[in-house]
Image (cartoon, grey):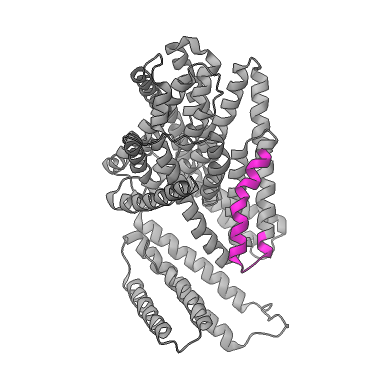
Amino acid sequence: MIEELALVGVVAVLVIVAVAYFAQKLGVAAPVILVLLGIGVSLLPGMPEIVIEPEWILYIVLPPILYSAAVNVPVIDFRRDFGTIGALSVGLVIISAFGTGLLLWWIMPDLGLPTAVALGAVISPPDAVAATAIGKKLGLPPRLVTILEGEGLVNDATALVLLRTSIAAMAGSFTFWGALGTFAYAAFVGVAVGGLVGISTVAVRSKIRQQPVLTTAISFVVPFLAFIPAEELHASGVIAVVTAGLITGHQSARRLAAQDRISERTNWRTAQLLLENGVFLLMGLELTSVLHAVDQRDPSIGITILIGLILVLALLVMRIAFLVPVIGVMRRRQRRSAELEPKLDRILTRLDSALATDASEKDRRRMQFARRRQADMRFRVQEGLGWRGGLVLGWSGMRGVVTLAAAQSLPTDTPHRAELVLIAFTVAIITLVLYGGTLPFLIKALGIRGSDAKHTQREFDRLSDHIAEATIAFLDGPGLRRANGEPFSAEAVQSERERVARTMQNIRSRAVEQVKGAPTELGELRRLVAEAQQDALIDAQETGTFSSHTLEIAQQVMDIEAARFRSH
Protein backbone atom coordinates (compact mmCIF):
# COMPACT_ATOMS: atom_id res chain seq x y z
CA MET A 1 0.00 0.00 0.00
CA ILE A 2 2.78 2.43 0.94
CA GLU A 3 4.66 1.55 -2.26
CA GLU A 4 1.54 2.22 -4.34
CA LEU A 5 0.95 5.61 -2.69
CA ALA A 6 4.60 6.55 -3.22
CA LEU A 7 4.37 5.57 -6.88
CA VAL A 8 1.17 7.60 -7.31
CA GLY A 9 2.88 10.60 -5.72
CA VAL A 10 5.89 10.34 -8.01
CA VAL A 11 3.71 10.01 -11.11
CA ALA A 12 1.55 12.96 -10.02
CA VAL A 13 4.61 15.23 -9.60
CA LEU A 14 5.96 14.22 -13.02
CA VAL A 15 2.56 14.84 -14.60
CA ILE A 16 2.27 18.27 -12.96
CA VAL A 17 5.74 19.29 -14.15
CA ALA A 18 5.09 18.04 -17.69
CA VAL A 19 1.71 19.79 -17.92
CA ALA A 20 3.11 23.03 -16.51
CA TYR A 21 5.94 22.94 -19.06
CA PHE A 22 3.77 22.28 -22.12
CA ALA A 23 0.96 24.57 -20.93
CA GLN A 24 3.34 27.54 -21.27
CA LYS A 25 4.07 26.60 -24.88
CA LEU A 26 0.39 26.00 -25.69
CA GLY A 27 -0.77 29.23 -24.05
CA VAL A 28 -3.32 27.37 -21.90
CA ALA A 29 -3.54 27.55 -18.10
CA ALA A 30 -2.11 24.39 -16.53
CA PRO A 31 -5.09 23.96 -14.12
CA VAL A 32 -7.44 23.59 -17.09
CA ILE A 33 -5.36 20.79 -18.62
CA LEU A 34 -4.90 19.07 -15.26
CA VAL A 35 -8.62 19.01 -14.49
CA LEU A 36 -9.42 17.56 -17.91
CA LEU A 37 -6.59 15.04 -17.55
CA GLY A 38 -7.85 14.04 -14.10
CA ILE A 39 -11.38 13.55 -15.43
CA GLY A 40 -10.08 11.41 -18.28
CA VAL A 41 -8.03 9.21 -15.95
CA SER A 42 -10.92 8.86 -13.45
CA LEU A 43 -13.18 7.50 -16.20
CA LEU A 44 -10.75 4.76 -17.25
CA PRO A 45 -12.07 1.21 -16.63
CA GLY A 46 -10.79 -0.24 -13.38
CA MET A 47 -9.65 3.11 -12.03
CA PRO A 48 -10.27 3.09 -8.27
CA GLU A 49 -12.30 5.85 -6.69
CA ILE A 50 -10.22 8.59 -5.11
CA VAL A 51 -11.61 10.47 -2.12
CA ILE A 52 -9.53 13.00 -0.22
CA GLU A 53 -10.68 14.09 3.23
CA PRO A 54 -11.64 17.81 3.12
CA GLU A 55 -9.63 18.45 6.30
CA TRP A 56 -6.47 17.55 4.38
CA ILE A 57 -7.25 20.27 1.85
CA LEU A 58 -8.35 22.93 4.34
CA TYR A 59 -5.66 22.34 6.98
CA ILE A 60 -2.64 21.09 5.02
CA VAL A 61 -2.93 22.31 1.43
CA LEU A 62 -4.81 25.61 1.68
CA PRO A 63 -2.54 27.46 4.20
CA PRO A 64 0.71 27.13 2.19
CA ILE A 65 -1.09 27.98 -1.06
CA LEU A 66 -2.49 31.18 0.46
CA TYR A 67 0.81 32.08 2.12
CA SER A 68 2.90 31.59 -1.01
CA ALA A 69 0.53 33.86 -2.92
CA ALA A 70 0.24 36.51 -0.19
CA VAL A 71 3.98 36.81 0.38
CA ASN A 72 4.41 37.87 -3.27
CA VAL A 73 1.57 40.41 -3.40
CA PRO A 74 2.91 43.98 -3.23
CA VAL A 75 1.45 45.48 -0.05
CA ILE A 76 1.40 48.98 -1.55
CA ASP A 77 -0.73 47.81 -4.50
CA PHE A 78 -2.96 45.80 -2.15
CA ARG A 79 -3.50 48.94 -0.06
CA ARG A 80 -4.27 51.11 -3.07
CA ASP A 81 -7.03 48.78 -4.26
CA PHE A 82 -8.17 47.61 -0.83
CA GLY A 83 -11.67 49.01 -1.40
CA THR A 84 -12.12 47.13 -4.68
CA ILE A 85 -10.60 43.94 -3.29
CA GLY A 86 -12.80 44.21 -0.19
CA ALA A 87 -15.93 44.74 -2.28
CA LEU A 88 -15.20 41.67 -4.41
CA SER A 89 -14.00 39.39 -1.63
CA VAL A 90 -16.70 40.28 0.91
CA GLY A 91 -19.63 42.01 -0.77
CA LEU A 92 -19.71 39.90 -3.94
CA VAL A 93 -19.20 36.64 -2.04
CA ILE A 94 -22.14 37.41 0.29
CA ILE A 95 -24.38 38.44 -2.61
CA SER A 96 -23.36 35.38 -4.62
CA ALA A 97 -23.93 33.03 -1.68
CA PHE A 98 -27.42 34.32 -0.92
CA GLY A 99 -28.35 34.81 -4.58
CA THR A 100 -27.45 31.27 -5.63
CA GLY A 101 -28.81 29.95 -2.32
CA LEU A 102 -32.23 31.47 -2.98
CA LEU A 103 -32.19 30.17 -6.55
CA LEU A 104 -31.27 26.67 -5.39
CA TRP A 105 -33.96 26.79 -2.69
CA TRP A 106 -36.50 27.70 -5.36
CA ILE A 107 -35.35 24.76 -7.52
CA MET A 108 -35.10 22.29 -4.61
CA PRO A 109 -37.51 23.60 -1.92
CA ASP A 110 -37.09 20.55 0.30
CA LEU A 111 -33.48 21.58 0.99
CA GLY A 112 -34.33 24.45 3.30
CA LEU A 113 -32.89 27.94 2.99
CA PRO A 114 -29.90 27.46 5.37
CA THR A 115 -28.73 24.38 3.44
CA ALA A 116 -29.14 26.17 0.10
CA VAL A 117 -27.17 29.19 1.35
CA ALA A 118 -24.49 26.80 2.65
CA LEU A 119 -23.98 25.51 -0.89
CA GLY A 120 -24.07 29.11 -2.12
CA ALA A 121 -21.18 29.86 0.25
CA VAL A 122 -19.32 26.83 -1.10
CA ILE A 123 -19.51 27.96 -4.75
CA SER A 124 -19.21 31.71 -4.20
CA PRO A 125 -15.40 32.32 -3.86
CA PRO A 126 -13.44 32.41 -7.14
CA ASP A 127 -9.95 30.92 -7.22
CA ALA A 128 -7.58 33.34 -8.97
CA VAL A 129 -4.80 30.81 -9.69
CA ALA A 130 -5.74 30.12 -13.30
CA ALA A 131 -6.75 33.72 -14.02
CA THR A 132 -3.52 35.25 -12.70
CA ALA A 133 -1.40 32.60 -14.44
CA ILE A 134 -3.01 33.51 -17.75
CA GLY A 135 -2.94 37.23 -17.01
CA LYS A 136 0.76 37.35 -16.16
CA LYS A 137 1.68 35.31 -19.23
CA LEU A 138 -0.35 37.53 -21.56
CA GLY A 139 0.86 40.76 -19.97
CA LEU A 140 -2.26 42.02 -18.22
CA PRO A 141 -1.86 45.36 -16.41
CA PRO A 142 -0.30 44.75 -12.97
CA ARG A 143 -3.25 46.45 -11.26
CA LEU A 144 -5.68 43.98 -12.78
CA VAL A 145 -3.54 41.03 -11.67
CA THR A 146 -3.25 42.46 -8.13
CA ILE A 147 -7.04 42.81 -7.84
CA LEU A 148 -7.52 39.21 -8.96
CA GLU A 149 -4.85 37.97 -6.54
CA GLY A 150 -6.23 40.03 -3.67
CA GLU A 151 -9.77 38.83 -4.29
CA GLY A 152 -8.61 35.21 -4.40
CA LEU A 153 -6.74 35.61 -1.12
CA VAL A 154 -9.50 37.15 1.00
CA ASN A 155 -12.74 35.76 -0.43
CA ASP A 156 -12.04 32.27 0.92
CA ALA A 157 -12.33 33.64 4.46
CA THR A 158 -15.73 35.19 3.73
CA ALA A 159 -17.01 31.99 2.15
CA LEU A 160 -15.82 29.72 4.95
CA VAL A 161 -17.28 31.97 7.67
CA LEU A 162 -20.59 32.04 5.73
CA LEU A 163 -20.48 28.26 5.42
CA ARG A 164 -19.88 27.89 9.15
CA THR A 165 -22.79 30.25 9.90
CA SER A 166 -25.10 28.44 7.49
CA ILE A 167 -24.30 25.07 9.06
CA ALA A 168 -25.15 26.56 12.47
CA ALA A 169 -28.43 27.83 11.01
CA MET A 170 -29.16 24.31 9.72
CA ALA A 171 -28.99 23.20 13.36
CA GLY A 172 -31.40 25.97 14.35
CA SER A 173 -28.91 28.28 16.13
CA PHE A 174 -28.85 31.40 13.96
CA THR A 175 -29.43 35.12 14.53
CA PHE A 176 -28.47 37.98 12.22
CA TRP A 177 -26.53 39.88 14.87
CA GLY A 178 -24.89 36.68 16.00
CA ALA A 179 -23.74 35.98 12.43
CA LEU A 180 -22.45 39.55 12.05
CA GLY A 181 -20.58 39.29 15.35
CA THR A 182 -19.10 35.94 14.30
CA PHE A 183 -17.83 37.45 11.06
CA ALA A 184 -16.33 40.50 12.81
CA TYR A 185 -14.69 38.30 15.45
CA ALA A 186 -13.27 35.93 12.82
CA ALA A 187 -11.78 38.82 10.83
CA PHE A 188 -10.38 40.78 13.80
CA VAL A 189 -8.80 37.81 15.57
CA GLY A 190 -7.52 36.43 12.26
CA VAL A 191 -5.72 39.70 11.50
CA ALA A 192 -4.33 39.83 15.06
CA VAL A 193 -3.01 36.26 14.99
CA GLY A 194 -1.59 36.64 11.50
CA GLY A 195 0.04 39.95 12.37
CA LEU A 196 1.64 38.51 15.48
CA VAL A 197 2.94 35.45 13.62
CA GLY A 198 4.21 37.50 10.67
CA ILE A 199 6.08 40.06 12.78
CA SER A 200 7.57 37.53 15.21
CA THR A 201 8.74 35.03 12.58
CA VAL A 202 10.38 37.75 10.47
CA ALA A 203 12.13 39.02 13.63
CA VAL A 204 13.43 35.51 14.40
CA ARG A 205 14.54 34.89 10.82
CA SER A 206 16.32 38.25 10.67
CA LYS A 207 18.59 37.06 13.51
CA ILE A 208 19.60 33.95 11.53
CA ARG A 209 21.25 35.84 8.70
CA GLN A 210 23.06 34.26 5.77
CA GLN A 211 21.64 30.82 6.55
CA PRO A 212 18.94 30.39 3.88
CA VAL A 213 18.32 26.73 4.69
CA LEU A 214 17.30 27.59 8.25
CA THR A 215 15.25 30.68 7.41
CA THR A 216 13.41 28.88 4.60
CA ALA A 217 12.66 25.97 6.95
CA ILE A 218 11.02 28.43 9.34
CA SER A 219 9.02 29.98 6.50
CA PHE A 220 7.54 26.56 5.68
CA VAL A 221 5.76 26.44 9.05
CA VAL A 222 4.62 30.10 9.10
CA PRO A 223 1.27 29.42 7.35
CA PHE A 224 0.45 26.68 9.85
CA LEU A 225 1.59 28.81 12.80
CA ALA A 226 -0.98 31.37 11.66
CA PHE A 227 -3.78 29.06 10.49
CA ILE A 228 -4.04 26.51 13.31
CA PRO A 229 -4.17 28.91 16.32
CA ALA A 230 -6.70 31.14 14.52
CA GLU A 231 -8.94 28.15 13.79
CA GLU A 232 -8.60 26.93 17.38
CA LEU A 233 -9.81 30.37 18.49
CA HIS A 234 -12.80 29.94 16.10
CA ALA A 235 -11.48 32.81 13.98
CA SER A 236 -10.53 32.87 10.30
CA GLY A 237 -7.36 30.91 9.65
CA VAL A 238 -7.44 32.14 6.05
CA ILE A 239 -7.24 35.80 7.10
CA ALA A 240 -4.47 34.92 9.57
CA VAL A 241 -2.39 33.24 6.86
CA VAL A 242 -2.93 36.08 4.37
CA THR A 243 -1.99 38.68 6.99
CA ALA A 244 1.17 36.79 7.93
CA GLY A 245 2.10 36.45 4.26
CA LEU A 246 1.57 40.13 3.47
CA ILE A 247 3.64 41.21 6.49
CA THR A 248 6.43 38.76 5.63
CA GLY A 249 6.57 39.88 2.00
CA HIS A 250 6.57 43.54 3.00
CA GLN A 251 9.29 43.22 5.65
CA SER A 252 11.55 40.73 3.89
CA ALA A 253 13.33 43.36 1.82
CA ARG A 254 14.29 45.27 4.98
CA ARG A 255 14.83 42.46 7.49
CA LEU A 256 16.07 39.40 5.55
CA ALA A 257 19.35 38.86 3.72
CA ALA A 258 19.38 38.72 -0.09
CA GLN A 259 20.47 35.08 -0.14
CA ASP A 260 17.63 34.18 2.23
CA ARG A 261 15.07 35.89 -0.02
CA ILE A 262 16.37 34.16 -3.15
CA SER A 263 16.31 30.74 -1.51
CA GLU A 264 12.84 31.24 -0.02
CA ARG A 265 11.42 32.53 -3.29
CA THR A 266 12.65 29.51 -5.25
CA ASN A 267 11.49 26.95 -2.69
CA TRP A 268 8.06 28.51 -2.26
CA ARG A 269 7.50 28.73 -6.00
CA THR A 270 8.20 25.01 -6.22
CA ALA A 271 5.82 24.23 -3.36
CA GLN A 272 3.17 26.51 -4.86
CA LEU A 273 3.46 24.80 -8.26
CA LEU A 274 2.98 21.32 -6.81
CA LEU A 275 0.23 22.17 -4.32
CA GLU A 276 -1.92 24.34 -6.57
CA ASN A 277 -1.72 22.11 -9.61
CA GLY A 278 -1.99 18.97 -7.49
CA VAL A 279 -5.37 20.16 -6.21
CA PHE A 280 -6.67 20.71 -9.73
CA LEU A 281 -5.53 17.24 -10.74
CA LEU A 282 -7.38 15.86 -7.71
CA MET A 283 -10.52 17.72 -8.75
CA GLY A 284 -10.64 15.71 -11.94
CA LEU A 285 -9.66 12.41 -10.30
CA GLU A 286 -12.40 12.67 -7.65
CA LEU A 287 -15.18 13.09 -10.22
CA THR A 288 -15.90 9.35 -10.43
CA SER A 289 -16.45 9.02 -6.68
CA VAL A 290 -18.76 12.03 -6.70
CA LEU A 291 -20.79 10.61 -9.59
CA HIS A 292 -21.12 7.22 -7.92
CA ALA A 293 -22.39 8.85 -4.73
CA VAL A 294 -25.23 10.44 -6.69
CA ASP A 295 -26.01 7.36 -8.80
CA GLN A 296 -29.40 5.74 -8.28
CA ARG A 297 -30.67 8.79 -6.44
CA ASP A 298 -33.36 11.34 -7.20
CA PRO A 299 -32.77 13.76 -8.87
CA SER A 300 -30.71 12.04 -11.53
CA ILE A 301 -27.12 12.88 -12.36
CA GLY A 302 -28.19 14.76 -15.47
CA ILE A 303 -30.63 16.99 -13.60
CA THR A 304 -28.06 17.63 -10.86
CA ILE A 305 -25.46 18.70 -13.42
CA LEU A 306 -28.09 20.89 -15.10
CA ILE A 307 -28.71 22.65 -11.77
CA GLY A 308 -24.97 23.22 -11.53
CA LEU A 309 -24.97 24.81 -15.01
CA ILE A 310 -27.84 27.10 -14.01
CA LEU A 311 -25.87 28.23 -10.95
CA VAL A 312 -22.80 28.87 -13.14
CA LEU A 313 -24.89 31.22 -15.26
CA ALA A 314 -26.34 32.90 -12.17
CA LEU A 315 -22.86 33.45 -10.70
CA LEU A 316 -21.65 35.04 -13.94
CA VAL A 317 -24.64 37.39 -14.13
CA MET A 318 -24.26 38.46 -10.49
CA ARG A 319 -20.50 38.98 -10.88
CA ILE A 320 -20.82 41.18 -13.96
CA ALA A 321 -23.74 43.13 -12.46
CA PHE A 322 -21.73 43.70 -9.28
CA LEU A 323 -18.67 44.86 -11.22
CA VAL A 324 -20.55 47.57 -13.14
CA PRO A 325 -20.82 49.99 -10.18
CA VAL A 326 -17.38 48.92 -8.86
CA ILE A 327 -15.70 49.88 -12.14
CA GLY A 328 -17.80 53.06 -12.17
CA VAL A 329 -16.45 54.07 -8.76
CA MET A 330 -12.90 53.32 -9.88
CA ARG A 331 -13.34 55.48 -12.98
CA ARG A 332 -14.70 58.36 -10.92
CA ARG A 333 -11.71 58.14 -8.58
CA GLN A 334 -9.42 58.15 -11.60
CA ARG A 335 -11.00 61.32 -12.98
CA ARG A 336 -10.91 62.95 -9.56
CA SER A 337 -7.23 62.07 -9.14
CA ALA A 338 -6.45 63.52 -12.58
CA GLU A 339 -8.05 66.80 -11.50
CA LEU A 340 -6.30 66.98 -8.11
CA GLU A 341 -2.85 65.74 -9.14
CA PRO A 342 -1.59 69.05 -10.64
CA LYS A 343 -2.75 70.96 -7.56
CA LEU A 344 -0.98 68.58 -5.22
CA ASP A 345 2.17 68.78 -7.36
CA ARG A 346 2.25 72.57 -6.97
CA ILE A 347 1.67 72.36 -3.21
CA LEU A 348 4.49 69.85 -2.80
CA THR A 349 6.85 71.98 -4.87
CA ARG A 350 6.24 74.97 -2.59
CA LEU A 351 6.61 72.81 0.53
CA ASP A 352 9.89 71.40 -0.75
CA SER A 353 11.27 74.91 -1.13
CA ALA A 354 10.00 76.04 2.27
CA LEU A 355 11.27 73.00 4.16
CA ALA A 356 14.56 72.57 2.32
CA THR A 357 16.58 74.32 5.01
CA ASP A 358 14.60 73.80 8.19
CA ALA A 359 12.31 70.79 8.48
CA SER A 360 11.26 69.14 11.71
CA GLU A 361 10.56 65.42 12.04
CA LYS A 362 6.82 66.18 12.06
CA ASP A 363 7.16 68.18 8.83
CA ARG A 364 9.08 65.35 7.18
CA ARG A 365 6.36 62.87 8.13
CA ARG A 366 3.74 65.16 6.64
CA MET A 367 5.76 65.45 3.46
CA GLN A 368 6.10 61.69 3.30
CA PHE A 369 2.34 61.28 3.69
CA ALA A 370 1.70 63.93 1.00
CA ARG A 371 4.10 62.21 -1.40
CA ARG A 372 2.32 58.92 -0.80
CA ARG A 373 -0.96 60.60 -1.67
CA GLN A 374 0.67 62.01 -4.79
CA ALA A 375 1.94 58.55 -5.78
CA ASP A 376 -1.52 57.05 -5.18
CA MET A 377 -3.13 59.67 -7.41
CA ARG A 378 -0.56 59.11 -10.14
CA PHE A 379 -1.16 55.35 -9.86
CA ARG A 380 -4.91 55.76 -10.33
CA VAL A 381 -4.43 58.02 -13.34
CA GLN A 382 -1.83 55.85 -15.08
CA GLU A 383 -3.24 52.43 -14.11
CA GLY A 384 -6.95 53.14 -14.54
CA LEU A 385 -9.33 50.31 -15.47
CA GLY A 386 -12.09 50.66 -18.03
CA TRP A 387 -14.87 48.43 -19.25
CA ARG A 388 -12.40 46.05 -20.92
CA GLY A 389 -10.61 45.42 -17.64
CA GLY A 390 -14.00 44.99 -15.96
CA LEU A 391 -14.97 42.38 -18.53
CA VAL A 392 -11.79 40.43 -17.83
CA LEU A 393 -12.52 40.61 -14.09
CA GLY A 394 -16.05 39.39 -14.77
CA TRP A 395 -14.82 36.45 -16.85
CA SER A 396 -12.25 35.43 -14.22
CA GLY A 397 -14.66 33.76 -11.81
CA MET A 398 -13.06 30.31 -11.81
CA ARG A 399 -13.73 28.16 -8.75
CA GLY A 400 -11.13 25.84 -7.28
CA VAL A 401 -9.59 24.47 -4.11
CA VAL A 402 -11.95 25.97 -1.50
CA THR A 403 -15.08 24.96 -3.44
CA LEU A 404 -13.69 21.43 -3.73
CA ALA A 405 -12.91 21.06 -0.03
CA ALA A 406 -15.81 23.04 1.42
CA ALA A 407 -18.37 21.01 -0.53
CA GLN A 408 -17.08 17.78 0.98
CA SER A 409 -17.05 19.29 4.47
CA LEU A 410 -20.86 19.58 4.54
CA PRO A 411 -22.32 17.51 7.43
CA THR A 412 -23.07 13.92 6.52
CA ASP A 413 -26.75 14.33 7.50
CA THR A 414 -27.26 17.25 5.11
CA PRO A 415 -30.31 16.64 2.86
CA HIS A 416 -29.25 15.64 -0.69
CA ARG A 417 -25.59 15.95 0.34
CA ALA A 418 -24.29 13.85 -2.58
CA GLU A 419 -26.21 15.99 -5.08
CA LEU A 420 -24.94 19.20 -3.48
CA VAL A 421 -21.35 17.98 -3.72
CA LEU A 422 -21.84 17.13 -7.40
CA ILE A 423 -23.37 20.58 -8.02
CA ALA A 424 -20.32 22.19 -6.42
CA PHE A 425 -17.97 20.04 -8.50
CA THR A 426 -19.92 20.93 -11.64
CA VAL A 427 -19.61 24.64 -10.90
CA ALA A 428 -15.89 24.34 -10.18
CA ILE A 429 -15.05 22.27 -13.25
CA ILE A 430 -17.26 24.17 -15.70
CA THR A 431 -16.04 27.60 -14.58
CA LEU A 432 -12.42 26.48 -14.64
CA VAL A 433 -12.57 24.88 -18.08
CA LEU A 434 -14.93 27.40 -19.68
CA TYR A 435 -13.48 30.63 -18.30
CA GLY A 436 -9.89 29.40 -18.08
CA GLY A 437 -10.00 27.97 -21.60
CA THR A 438 -11.44 31.10 -23.21
CA LEU A 439 -9.85 33.85 -21.10
CA PRO A 440 -6.69 34.09 -23.28
CA PHE A 441 -8.82 34.65 -26.37
CA LEU A 442 -10.91 37.27 -24.56
CA ILE A 443 -7.80 39.16 -23.42
CA LYS A 444 -6.37 39.13 -26.94
CA ALA A 445 -9.70 40.11 -28.49
CA LEU A 446 -10.06 43.08 -26.14
CA GLY A 447 -6.49 44.16 -26.87
CA ILE A 448 -5.61 44.61 -23.20
CA ARG A 449 -1.93 45.20 -22.60
CA GLY A 450 0.25 45.97 -19.62
CA SER A 451 2.04 49.22 -18.93
CA ASP A 452 3.22 51.35 -21.83
CA ALA A 453 6.77 50.36 -22.86
CA LYS A 454 8.14 53.90 -22.77
CA HIS A 455 6.51 54.56 -19.39
CA THR A 456 8.00 51.35 -17.98
CA GLN A 457 11.46 52.24 -19.26
CA ARG A 458 11.22 55.75 -17.81
CA GLU A 459 10.18 54.31 -14.46
CA PHE A 460 13.16 51.95 -14.38
CA ASP A 461 15.46 54.85 -15.28
CA ARG A 462 14.03 57.04 -12.52
CA LEU A 463 14.36 54.22 -9.99
CA SER A 464 17.96 53.60 -11.03
CA ASP A 465 18.77 57.30 -10.65
CA HIS A 466 17.07 57.40 -7.25
CA ILE A 467 19.06 54.41 -5.96
CA ALA A 468 22.31 55.70 -7.43
CA GLU A 469 21.88 59.17 -5.90
CA ALA A 470 21.14 57.73 -2.47
CA THR A 471 24.13 55.36 -2.71
CA ILE A 472 26.57 58.08 -3.83
CA ALA A 473 25.33 60.37 -1.05
CA PHE A 474 25.98 57.56 1.42
CA LEU A 475 29.51 57.00 0.05
CA ASP A 476 30.25 60.73 0.25
CA GLY A 477 28.82 61.08 3.75
CA PRO A 478 31.16 62.03 6.61
CA GLY A 479 29.80 59.21 8.80
CA LEU A 480 31.06 56.41 6.53
CA ARG A 481 33.46 54.39 8.69
CA ARG A 482 34.66 50.82 9.05
CA ALA A 483 33.71 48.72 12.08
CA ASN A 484 36.94 49.76 13.83
CA GLY A 485 36.15 53.46 13.30
CA GLU A 486 38.73 54.07 10.57
CA PRO A 487 37.70 55.60 7.21
CA PHE A 488 37.54 53.49 4.07
CA SER A 489 40.36 53.92 1.59
CA ALA A 490 39.81 56.07 -1.50
CA GLU A 491 40.49 53.02 -3.69
CA ALA A 492 37.75 50.98 -1.98
CA VAL A 493 35.23 53.82 -2.25
CA GLN A 494 36.05 54.39 -5.93
CA SER A 495 35.76 50.66 -6.65
CA GLU A 496 32.33 50.64 -5.00
CA ARG A 497 31.26 53.67 -7.06
CA GLU A 498 32.10 51.77 -10.23
CA ARG A 499 30.22 48.69 -9.00
CA VAL A 500 27.15 50.82 -8.23
CA ALA A 501 27.26 52.25 -11.75
CA ARG A 502 27.42 48.74 -13.22
CA THR A 503 24.49 47.60 -11.03
CA MET A 504 22.34 50.51 -12.19
CA GLN A 505 23.21 49.70 -15.79
CA ASN A 506 22.16 46.12 -15.14
CA ILE A 507 18.77 47.33 -13.88
CA ARG A 508 18.29 49.43 -17.02
CA SER A 509 19.38 46.55 -19.22
CA ARG A 510 16.93 44.17 -17.57
CA ALA A 511 14.22 46.79 -17.96
CA VAL A 512 14.77 46.86 -21.72
CA GLU A 513 14.50 43.06 -21.82
CA GLN A 514 11.26 43.16 -19.81
CA VAL A 515 9.74 45.72 -22.18
CA LYS A 516 10.94 44.30 -25.49
CA GLY A 517 10.74 40.64 -24.50
CA ALA A 518 14.17 39.93 -25.99
CA PRO A 519 17.67 40.15 -24.51
CA THR A 520 19.71 43.26 -25.18
CA GLU A 521 23.12 42.99 -26.79
CA LEU A 522 24.78 43.42 -23.41
CA GLY A 523 22.47 40.89 -21.75
CA GLU A 524 23.07 38.37 -24.55
CA LEU A 525 26.84 38.83 -24.25
CA ARG A 526 26.72 38.32 -20.49
CA ARG A 527 24.85 35.07 -20.88
CA LEU A 528 27.36 33.79 -23.43
CA VAL A 529 30.20 34.73 -21.10
CA ALA A 530 28.44 32.92 -18.23
CA GLU A 531 28.22 29.79 -20.38
CA ALA A 532 31.94 30.03 -21.23
CA GLN A 533 32.78 30.43 -17.54
CA GLN A 534 30.65 27.40 -16.70
CA ASP A 535 32.46 25.34 -19.34
CA ALA A 536 35.80 26.36 -17.80
CA LEU A 537 34.59 25.36 -14.33
CA ILE A 538 33.39 21.97 -15.61
CA ASP A 539 36.77 21.43 -17.24
CA ALA A 540 38.46 22.22 -13.90
CA GLN A 541 36.18 19.71 -12.16
CA GLU A 542 37.02 16.97 -14.66
CA THR A 543 40.78 17.49 -14.43
CA GLY A 544 40.69 17.36 -10.63
CA THR A 545 43.33 20.07 -10.23
CA PHE A 546 41.28 22.01 -7.66
CA SER A 547 39.75 20.94 -4.37
CA SER A 548 36.02 20.15 -4.30
CA HIS A 549 35.47 22.82 -1.64
CA THR A 550 37.00 25.52 -3.86
CA LEU A 551 34.98 24.36 -6.85
CA GLU A 552 31.74 24.35 -4.83
CA ILE A 553 32.18 27.94 -3.68
CA ALA A 554 33.08 29.09 -7.20
CA GLN A 555 29.96 27.33 -8.54
CA GLN A 556 27.72 29.07 -6.02
CA VAL A 557 29.13 32.50 -6.92
CA MET A 558 28.77 31.85 -10.65
CA ASP A 559 25.21 30.56 -10.19
CA ILE A 560 24.22 33.78 -8.40
CA GLU A 561 25.84 35.90 -11.10
CA ALA A 562 24.24 33.90 -13.93
CA ALA A 563 20.81 34.06 -12.29
CA ARG A 564 20.89 37.85 -12.49
CA PHE A 565 20.83 37.73 -16.27
CA ARG A 566 18.59 34.74 -16.90
CA SER A 567 15.73 35.22 -19.34
CA HIS A 568 12.13 35.33 -18.17
Magenta stretch: dominant SS? helix
| Magenta highlight range | 205-230
User: Which residue is at a point 73% across and 82% down the rendered structure image?
Assistant: 485
Residue 86 appears anywhere in the view: no
> Residue 80 at what x, y percent from top left?
53, 44
Residue placed most toward the observer, 387 or 354: 387
Query: Going 60% across and 55% down the picture, which residue do you hit?
Result: 219
- Give the tally of numbered discs: 0
Please give left or right for residue 120 compared with residue 398 in the image. right
Reply above or below: 200 against 422: below
Q: Is residue 115 magenta?
A: no
Please name the residue shown 36% across and 76% down the image. Answer: 531
- The part of the image, by quadrant, that contains residue 256 is bottom right
Q: Nearer the viewer, residue 491 or 253?
A: 253
Closer-to-camera residue (447/348): 447
Q: Position of residue 96 (x, y in %)?
A: 48, 25
